[in-house]
Structures are given as structure tokens and as C-alpha cells.
Amino acid sequence: MAQVHLRSLLSLAGAEVCGLAALEVAPALSDLCQSQSIPVGTGVEWLLDACRPGAIVVATPTDTHAGLVAEAARAGCHVFCEKPLGRTAAEAANTLSGCQEAGVKLAVGHVVRYFPAYARIAEMVKAGQIGPPGMAKCRRVSGPPGGQRGWYRDAVRSGGLMLDMGVHDFDWLRWCLGPVERVSALTSPANLGQAAMVVLAHVSGAISVVELSWMDPEGFATAVEVSGPKGLVRHDSRRSPTYLTELWPANEGSDPAVRVHLATPTDDPYRDEVAAALSWFGGGPQPRSTGLDAVAAVALAEAAERSAARGEPVPAGEVAPEGAL
Amino acid sequence: MAKRARLPVAVLGAGHVHAPGYIRCLQAHPDVDLVGIYDETAATARHLAEEAGTSAFRSVPEALENARAVAICPEPTRQLALVQAAVSAGLPVLCEKPFGTNLAEATALLRLSEKVPLSVALPVRYHPAAVKLKVTVQSGALGASAAVWATNRNSFPGGWFADRSLAGGGCLLDHLVHVADLVRWIWGTELVSAMAEAGTRHYPGLEAEDTAAVLVRCSNGLVVSLDPSMSRPRGMPGALDLTLKVWAERGTARADIFPPGVEWVDEHGFLHQEAVGADMDRGMLDDWVGSVVRDRPAPVPARDAFAATCLSFAAQQSAIEHRAVPVPH
């Protein structure tokens, strides 16, 4: 995601990129930095000391988010952190409270809230267009994940399918249908690739189903539907007229391309989410998702993992910290 | 022209929404003489008999005396008594789903099926897409299957579905059995346990769940999600769906039993869909009639319907108790 966010930042008036730190810089990213005269270094210490940023964007593997955000907070930097906020709910909650204590703002990249179809559906549902929502279904599929050195595939680092993919839908469903009371989940046998299904019982009485797969030969796609007594609204990225962006892998032969379906060529939810965060850092309104939302989304993924392991429904309160159901 | 001896078939109980479709198929069947229709609600029998150009029976014995086989298709809670009557008369039976509205009824039906050939109306087995999926899975082309995402949704049908004393339950009773049967039939696996949530927000005042989500664990490791909700707005094109999305080692497969077919948009801009092709009701009734005429075993055995229907009972209990519930055997 580093390249996506860097391009967004470069396109936004009012932001200046003062440096980029990475353990390993992909050639395309390195070229981009060179052409824009952006200094490149290796450690977060270097970035904070030498470049003196007002805010940083964290786009590293999930298990490094907590440490990097904490260092930025200590240096008084606002932070935009790629989702998920942490590997566990407890870690994510710690990260959030660390930022609050340090007096810095923490925005998290729950980009689905900025995808036009998802934003529109949430708006219609909240406006009562289908009546009180009763049932929602989110599907999110892709091929086996890539990522530098395959860290996505390492569940210890990424949280696997449930956290890495599911967190998007968990967050969006909480946004749209409200807090969750109970989580039930199943995962496919580990030796056969990865598919998972999660049922959320919302406090309102609504039910959500989240179905996730890393086994799709056709690549990335999402679908969403919400129904209620007065109708239903839905969107399917494969059925809708889409514009397709393909981002080539950083290293030849390493990872499959990330493909992004957009409703129209001008939509760029990734730029919109970063723009909203920067505006907030500068005194503007809070972005669509709060730090507490981000903690709650991680908690739902963790509850789902726990349910799948235990084979029983799990009360969301068992995992989610107070106030983040 | 010499008339072939045709099988005299009576329809015993016709209150179920599937009855008119079965009656049409029986009436058109070259080997069947549709001798008449009985229903506890006399007006239902009269109306359907008039439409089909056959007699309306006024009592169960009258129907049984005139038939050599019966298709039993009433509202769910009226089913067991009619099957008992048909079995006492020693007649082969085609029995509508669900196979009992609770475990005691389902067990009673299973016992009855030991006395006469009893086949259960699970027509989706006869849909070409289901058959194709079964053949593909069993050929090994997909490798081992890891997960299935299934839907079998519709709009709230109204009528007796709103009356608990006739329907016997909500969407967990009405709409799990088809997918449950397909999973057992295609993968040759047992349904082990269910976790379910049930909702009541689409049709406030309904005495049963109108929405639900079910997660099923199978004996071969396969995991299944199943949405049986009555969550489609009434009049929506494609409101009734039955889809299976299979995730497997070597790829994925999708069966869509009610694909959009022909889509059209009317002068007001409303989208309509019409199914085309495959008539699975006819396939099922042909097979059942053939089995009776040729004295063969029931094509859709009662023990399969029992095992599939038991998922409903486990899911109902799970939705109340918020725990994983073993599927009764």
C-alpha cells in the first residue's frame, strides 16, 4: 500500500512528503522517490529525527503497526495507519490510548467507507430507505495473497484472511448496522487454501454474514447487500460496470498484482481516505472511521478467529474492549 | 388408439405452495391418471381440481380408495397425519418437504417410510446445474472442497407461512433442507453441527424467524454457510434464489439454480426476470412415477430427507441457545 499512499500524498495540495523509511524499497517506489526528490532511509528513528514530519503514514506489515505508531506518537506526530490497526484487539486498544495520551490524532485506513458503492449503500441504509435493516451480506475474495516476502500469508504477522480481509467488512457492517453482540465463524480446513464465513449478530437484532476467500482464480472482487422490510440495496464489483486498476508486483515473480475495481475512473477511495485524515490533522472534521471503530473492527476479527477455533459462537464483549463493540 | 394402463395418482393435501406445480406435472404425465385432489380446506381442493380438470375428493379415505399412489403436499403441520393414512392404505408416497416440523415428527415419518416406498420432494437434485456440480465434484476436477457459500432465499410468501400452527416454523424450517440435501448428496458427507442466528426484523409480528444465517460443519471437513432468509422484497426479480459457491483446492465452482434467465425492463423502468429451460419439478415427478410403475426403490430416500431436515432442528436450537448444536442423526 506504500506506493498507493505515496501517490495519493503527492497528488494532494497541502501535503509535502519529507521522507520515506522502509527496510526494503521496491524499485518502482525508489524511482518515484528519486523523481520527487524525497529522501529515503531505513528506520523510523531516522524518519522522525531527520525529516521532522508533522504526520506519518504507516503502511507496513500488520504486526509492526503498534510499535511504529507508538514511536510516531512519542515524537508528537499525527498518524495515518493502514488497516488493521493491530494484530489483536488489546494491541489496537493500546495503540489508540497511546496516541490519546500523547495528544496526537490517529486515523486508520478503513478505505471501504470511501468506496463509492459502499458509502452510498451505508447512506441509503442510514436514511431508512430499506426500513430497519435486518440482514446484510458481504463477500470479499481474491487469489492467494502476495506482499513483500509473503508476509500476508503468515497469519502470525498479518492475522490471515479473517483480519486482513475481514476487517474491511467488519468495520463497514458496524458502521452501517451498529454494534455487534455475538460472532460465529467457520474456516475451511487449513490444508485446502483459505475460505471463511462469519455471522455477526448485531445488538439491533440485525444479522450480517461475511464470507471471505483467498482461493479465487479470477482475483479480487467484493459484493455487498443489505435488506430490510422496505427493500434491499446491493452492489457486486464483478457485475457492475467497473474500471480496473492493476498494480504490478514490486519484484518480478514475487506477488500477484493487486487489482482494484472502481465504479468510475475518477473515484479514488485511497486518495479520499488519506485526504480526510490530513484534513482532520489540520483541524478539519473527523474522518468517517474513528480510532475506536478501528479497535472494534480488529476485535470482531479476533472474535471470529476465536469462534472458528472453538467451534462455538463468541460474545463480542469477550474480545472487544469497553466501548468498542 | 389403445389406451395404456395409467397409474392412478391422488394428490393428498394440496395447501403447500408447491402443489400447483406438481399437479400440473402429474396432469401432463403420459403414465399418470390424476384421479383427484383432497385438501383439508375443501375450497383449495375444489379450486385446484377445477383448474386441473379432475375431481375434488371430500375425504381422505375417498382419495386413498381411488389411487395406487399419492403425492402429499399440504401445509407442513398437516403432513404427518396424511402420510400415516397413506401408509396404512399401503400406498407409495411422494412426500413434500420439510420432512416433519420437529424431530419427533421427522422420526415418525422415517419409521413410516420403512413400510411403503416413500420418496421426498427434493427437486433440486434434478436441476442440471446441481447434477453438473455433483459430477464435477465427484470427478475430482476441483480437488478437495474446502468451503461452500450457499443461499436459498425468497420473499415472504404470505398465506399460511404467517400462521405458526400451519407452517410449523420460519425460514430455518422452510429453506435449509434443499441446500442441506445437496451438500450430503454431492459430497457424500454428514452434517455434523450448526451455529445459527435468527432474525425477525423484516416482517414484524411474524411468529417465526424471517431471516437467518447458518454455519455448518461436515464430517469430511467441509464448512458451509447458508442463508435461508425471506429477505427479498416482494415482487423483486429473482427473489427466489438457490446458489452454491464452492471453494476447492484447484479452483471454484458456482451453481445457480434460478439464474436470471431472460431479463426485461418494463415501460416504467422496472426490471423483470423470467426463468427459462430446466424444469426440475418434472424431472423429479418423472423419476418418482417411474419408480412406482416399475416397482423400484424411492428415488429420494426418506433417510436423506430426514438427515437434511435435521439441520433445521439443530439450527433452530442454536439460534435460541447461542451455541453450536450437533445435527441429530
Image (cartoon, coloured by chain):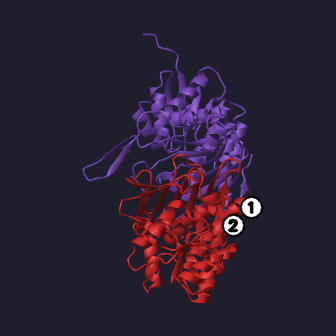
Chain colours: A red, B purple
Tag 2 subunit = A
Query: Do the residues at pointers 2 and 1 share their chain?
Result: yes
Tag 1 subunit = A
Residue at the spot 72% in from the left edge and 50% down from the top edge? B327
User: Label 2 neighbourhood size at 10 Å, few (<14), some (14-19), many (20+)?
Assistant: many
Q: Quadrant of residue B131?
A: top right
Kind of element beneath mark 1? helix
Position of A5 relative to B146 (above/below): below
What residue does disc 1 label? A310
Position of B45 relative to B324 (above/below): above
x, y percentage for residue A316? 65, 71
Is residue B165 in view? no
Report the residue that reaches farthest toward the top: B1
User: Label 1 neighbourhood size at 10 Å, few (<14), some (14-19), many (20+)?
Assistant: some
Is the residue under label 1 in contact with that under label 2 (CB below 8 Å)?
A: yes
What residue does disc 2 label? A314
Report the residue that reaches farthest toward the left: B267
Kind of element beneath mark 2? strand
